[in-house]
Image: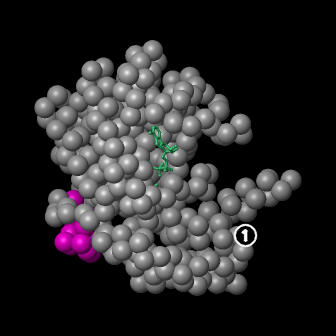
């Protein structure tokens, strides 16, 4: 029987992950936690919830013990653009929270998942079809945290035999919960603005290619990796995963296939553009495909159709 505890569960990934895991393992077997209370109409109010600040190690240990968890999915973190505004705070939350989560996993022999990111690469990394194993010298605080996190997860696996697993997510596109301050958020905002205003001004410049993936594929990938035979996992912390490499113009063209009147302008934000410029154009997910069968279903056009339809429905419900 799986008993899963999730930190940062009210975030963009956590919200949909909780829903999918509850569908699979039963509502009462998935404990959602976050530093803040869920809103009254939150979709995750269909099961147990506890307030947890991941820097509070005692509370984390207490919750894992009382819930009798066998799996910990650690999502609480400060994302790239927000981390850059307050780097020391980001270090303390991202690294302090991760160490606490790994310690509780070691103590209670939990299976462990935490995401890394394409932010774990830097300007010296090969930019196109970035290999699984390559140069990782990121220049953002977020990237520094992600590389350190990958190494720390490897350390807990080799030193303490904790079953740590991870993947380097690209920008994740979703409509259920708004993104939490990443560099790739433009690729979510553009769909909302397309439906609501018919135009969008991108803070990321034309011709800036970054990897993206639809949230359903990300959630399926997490479950698939956690269920994979551990003996097959050579690169367990952390796998390159991606479904597409796009720039704002490609997203525009895809939206215009559904909404021909859509307009895209540019109002580039130098800080987020600098982070984007330091990341790969595209990454190579071959190891994830070979070692545990990663197989995303959505390409840009199928994702665009679904995003636009879902946002329209969401807005119709809100105005009823
Ligand atoms: P998010 O910002 O949407 O959510 C993070 C959640 O953590 C929020 O609900 C927040 O309230 C909570 N939180 C903040 N401080 C906390 C604390 N001290 N204790 C407990 N909870 C706290 O982030 P997300 O997009 O869901 O990302 C989850 C993980 O996935 C992060 O590690 C992130 O780096 C990684 N990731 C996300 C993306 C993406 O596109 N969303 C891409 C690559 C990697």
Q: Residue furthest right?
A: 320
Q: Position of residue 305 (x, y in %)?
A: 62, 67
Q: Which residue lies at the image location 62% right of the left edge and 68% below the top edge?
A: 191
Residue position marked by numbered label 1 in the rendering:
196
Residue 317 shows in this picture:
yes
Magenta highlight: main SS:
loop
Image x and y of residue 314, in percent:
73, 56
* Residue in front for this viewpoint, 175 or 91: 91
Write down the quadrant of residue 56 in the picture: top left
Residue 116 coordinates in the image, percent (x, y): 32, 51
Residue in the foreground of this view, choosing between 222 and 152 = 152
Quadrant assignment for the N terminus = top left
- Which residue is most to the left? 159
Q: Is residue 193 above or below residue 64?
A: below
Percent position (x, y) of residue 256? 63, 81
Crowd class of label 1 (few under 14; some 14 to 19; many from 20; radius 10 Å): few
- Identity of the residue drawn at 71% across and 36% down: 40
Q: Quadrant of residue 196?
A: bottom right
Position of residue 74 in the picture relative to residue 230 (left or right): right
Q: Residue at x 26, y 56 (%)?
A: 144
Q: Secondary structure at mark 1?
A: helix
Q: In this rendering, is residue 276 above or below 205?
A: above
Q: Is residue 126 magenta?
A: yes
Q: Which one is nearer the viewer's eye here, 277 or 215? A: 277
**Observer able to see residue 27:** no
**Magenta stretch bounds:** 121-132
Image side of residue 267 versus residue 199, left or right: left
Give the colour scheme shown. one colour
User: In the shown orientation, is residue 119 left or right of residue 37?
Assistant: left
Q: Residue drawn at (52%, 69%), measured in percent from left and top?
A: 186
């Amino acid at each position: 029987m799986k008993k899963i505890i999730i930190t940062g569960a009210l975030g963009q990934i956590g919200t949909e992950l909780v829903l999918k895991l509850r569908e699979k393992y039963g509502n009462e077997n998935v404990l959602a936690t976050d530093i803040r209370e869920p809103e009254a109409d939150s979709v995750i109010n269909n099961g147990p919830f506890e307030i947890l600040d991941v820097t509070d190690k005692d509370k984390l240990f207490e919750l894992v013990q009382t819930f009798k968890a066998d799996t910990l999915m650690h999502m609480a973190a400060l994302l790239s653009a927000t981390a850059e505004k307050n780097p020391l705070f980001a270090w303390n939350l991202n690294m302090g929270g991760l160490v606490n989560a790994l310690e509780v996993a070691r103590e209670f022999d939990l299976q462990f998942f935490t995401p890394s990111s394409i932010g774990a690469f830097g300007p010296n990394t090969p930019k196109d079809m970035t290999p699984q194993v390559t140069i990782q010298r990121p220049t953002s605080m977020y990237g520094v945290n992600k590389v350190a996190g990958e190494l720390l997860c490897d350390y807990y696996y080799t030193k303490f035999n904790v079953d740590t697993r991870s993947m380097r997510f690209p920008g994740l596109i979703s409509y259920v919960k708004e993104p939490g301050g990443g560099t790739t958020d433009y690729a979510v905002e553009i769909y909302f603005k397309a439906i609501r205003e018919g135009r969008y001004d991108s803070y990321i410049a034309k011709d800036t290619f970054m990897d993206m993936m639809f949230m359903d594929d990300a959630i399926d990938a997490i479950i698939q990796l956690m269920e994979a035979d551990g003996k097959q996992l050579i690169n367990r912390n952390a796998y390159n995963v991606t479904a597409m490499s796009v720039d704002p113009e490609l997203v525009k063209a895809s939206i215009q296939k559904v909404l021909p009147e859509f307009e895209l302008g540019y109002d580039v934000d130098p800080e987020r553009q600098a982070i984007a410029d330091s990341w790969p154009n595209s990454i190579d997910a071959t190891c994830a495909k070979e070692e545990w069968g990663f197989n995303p279903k959505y390409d840009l056009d199928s994702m665009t159709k679904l995003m636009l339809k879902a946002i329209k429905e969401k807005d119709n419900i809100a105005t009823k």
